[in-house]
Amino acid sequence: MRTLVQPLTQRQIDAASKFWADGWESGELAQLKNAFPDRLEAIRVKAIVLNELYGTNVIAIHKVAKRLEELLKETSTTGPLLVEELVEDISKKVTGRNHYSFVSKFGHFFVNSNLPILDSYAEEMAAWHLGQAQSRNPKRYRRFCENVEMLIEFAGLTCDCAKLDAYLWVAGEYRSWSKKRKREISSGLKRRFEGLQNDPESEPALRDLLGPMCKSFSY
């Protein structure tokens, strides 16, 4: 079995699940999923609410939501290829930008929960763990998904992508913050990181999530 350049343990993933359960997922999204469980229901509403709550910064969100609705009704694809197709189409026909964060979040929450959420923090953390073993796929989302699969395999983890997402996001933000304390990150996480720094015993789940990164971090 291949090994990771930077180790990752099941204990860290379990701690991430515990930490995430402490109110990090928006209750509004859970309500939307319960009210409109079918992936083709209320697509525009879901897109607009997601963009607002998660700050994915899609300026033309009403136009994007309309195009998203049209595209999802035309396809039965639910895997990683769906995200690439949606990102490409929205970029070409609506905004001129690649909205990977927004589209992958929408896909994860409202289409297929096994679709990993791509953001720069998660992307960089997966690459940090894998080193030279990371995927060379030219498609950004497909590359990230392949890295997530390898990360789970090489670390011998038993988890779904939602639990790994929680780890990658929190650890990625911590990595950024530990390098430059004035960098803009989630205000809620920043408070928890500062609390951990001031009193390590006050944040046991966060301490276990970060593992060796609590003591030192080098790329």
Image: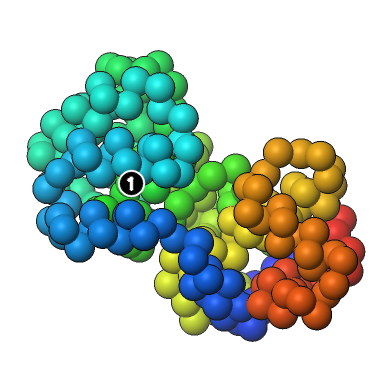
Q: Is residue 181 above or below residue 146?
A: above
Residue tagged 1? 106
Query: Who's the residue at 80% across and 59% down the image?
Result: 194
Q: For residue 29, which quarter of the picture?
A: bottom left
In percent of width and height, residue 171 lies at 67, 60
Indicate left or right for 158 with 71 as reference.
right
Q: Residue at x 54, y 63 (%)?
A: 166
* Location of residue 133 by image quarter: bottom right
**Residue type, label 1:** Phe
Image height of 107 relative to 47, above or below: below
Is residue 126 among what the camera can see? no
Closest to the observer, 158 or 23: 23
Q: How is the image coloured?
A: rainbow
Question: Looking at the image, how many numbered discs can be counted on the residues?
Answer: 1
Residue 48 in the figure: left or right of residue 135? left
Horizontal and vertical percent position of residue 4:
70, 68
Image point 66% across, 77% down: which residue? 205
Q: Secondary structure at mark 1?
A: helix
| Nearer-the-camera pick, 149 or 136 | 149
**Residue 134 percent location from the top left of the image:** 62, 54
For residue 192, say whether it is visible.
Answer: yes
